[in-house]
Amino acid sequence: PTPGKKLTIAIEGCCHGELDNIYGTLQHLEQKEGKKIDLLISCGDFQAVRNLDDLETMSCPVKYRALNTFYKYYSGEAKAPYPTLFIGGNHEAANYMWELYYGGWAAPNIYFMGYTGCVKFGGVRIAGLSGTYSQAAYMRGHDEKLPYSESSIRSMYHIRDFEVYRLMQIKQPVDIFLSHDWPTNIANYGNKEQLLSRKQFLRSEIEDGSLGNPAGQQLMSALQPRYWFSAHMHTKFPAIVPHSDSSITRFLALDKCLPGRDFLQVAVIPLISSSVFQHIFWTISYDEEWLAIMRSTHDVINLDRRHQPLPGMGALRKGASEADVKVVEEVLQQRGGAKIDPTAFVQTARPADASAAAASNSGSHTGFRGPKK
Ligand code: 5GP
Ligand code: MN
């Protein structure tokens, strides 16, 4: 892509380790429709499972417990054909995602946004929150230790208040926000009856406002991103959320990767202002404000079971301190810019071998045998 052009992004709902199938579908689409995809974004349940040990840290019903195809991209046997960005959901290799808490290459060309994160690609600013909401874990520290108990396997993917607090500090405009579960009340901003005709069992939760992620709703109204993409509910659902200052957020939830399901959406994102072009990298890049916020809010992380209540979120959107903004500017300058080094991926575990993978995948119930030719 050239500066001034639009960015073509493929957004995918729940991935479930089906990388071969998703990339295959995209390549098929490119050929059939003559579209060029610049970036793939996955909205969680990514299942970056490197080997059979990782499977033990993933919350997952037994019938779905399979390696699927991420391990090939991890080992180097296969190469991701598109720069790929993902957040986590409720089915993840928890031990591996914890290694990449602040984000990082999960495999060459496949970047995990971290438990919270914000990066840039082609001048578009993308922020995200991994995991799903659970009131019981919200104000707890990340005190889980390996080997994870049954309960830790679940709480590992529950979002924490201090993670939301850090995202709330973002002040500069966000183009795209990603969350795995839907922001609370989002169903009221789209065709609710059509949604309920597919998902009747959600009626009472939608009506009493208990469905979804309240932190997502808070973040949406504070950050007012131009687009918000989610997954988790296994259905496509568009909505438009108006904000008080007449700006809007276009919301889209997508299905999981299964044949015949709406798991992909190609979106052409117009770039807002040509003034940002001088800072554009057509690769995944660090976001300066986010790095500074990470520094300024370091003390809110809690690795013990309990922590003090955080300062009121709405009242305290302070952003990063000037000193931290300066440090980040200096460090990035020394490094030669904000581009994330594409060679910085490191293997930290032994990838599964082909025979272990074949054995694991022979029991897979996903039934996806690739795109129709
Ligand atoms: P997953 O793929 O993450 O295991 O599960 C997602 C499934 O659980 C979807 O089929 C979705 O409809 C359902 N689900 C997720 N969150 C909720 C919720 O808060 N209430 C109800 N009733 N169903 C949910
Ligand atoms: Mn899910």
Image (spheres, helix red, strand yellow):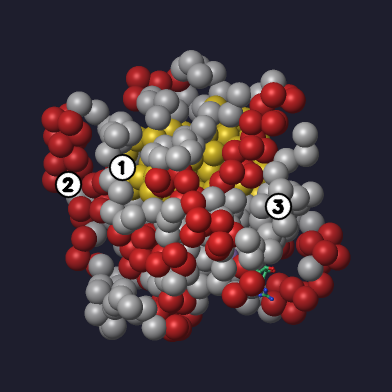
Q: Where residue 223 sits: x, y (%)?
A: 46, 51
Cβ of mark 1 under 8 Å from ligand 2: the answer is no
The answer to whether any part of residue 84 appears in the image is yes
Q: Which residue is mark 1?
A: 345
Q: Residue at x 54, y 50 (%)?
A: 69
Q: Where residue 325 sits: x, y (%)?
A: 20, 42
Foreground residue among 170 and 4: 4
Label 2's element?
Answer: helix
Mark with earlier residue (2, 1): 2
Task: Give the quadrant of ligand 2.
Answer: bottom right
Q: Which residue is mark 3?
A: 368
Q: Quadrant of residue 8?
A: top right
Foreground residue among 238 and 82: 82
Disc 1 crowd rating (10 Å Cα; few below 14, some 14-19, many 20+) is some
Choose mark 3 or mark 1, whichever is in front.
3
Q: Which residue is mark 2?
A: 324
Is 48 located above or below residue 110 in the figure?
below
Foreground residue among 231 and 27: 27
Side of 334 where 360 appears, left or right: right
Viewport quadrant of the C terminus? top right
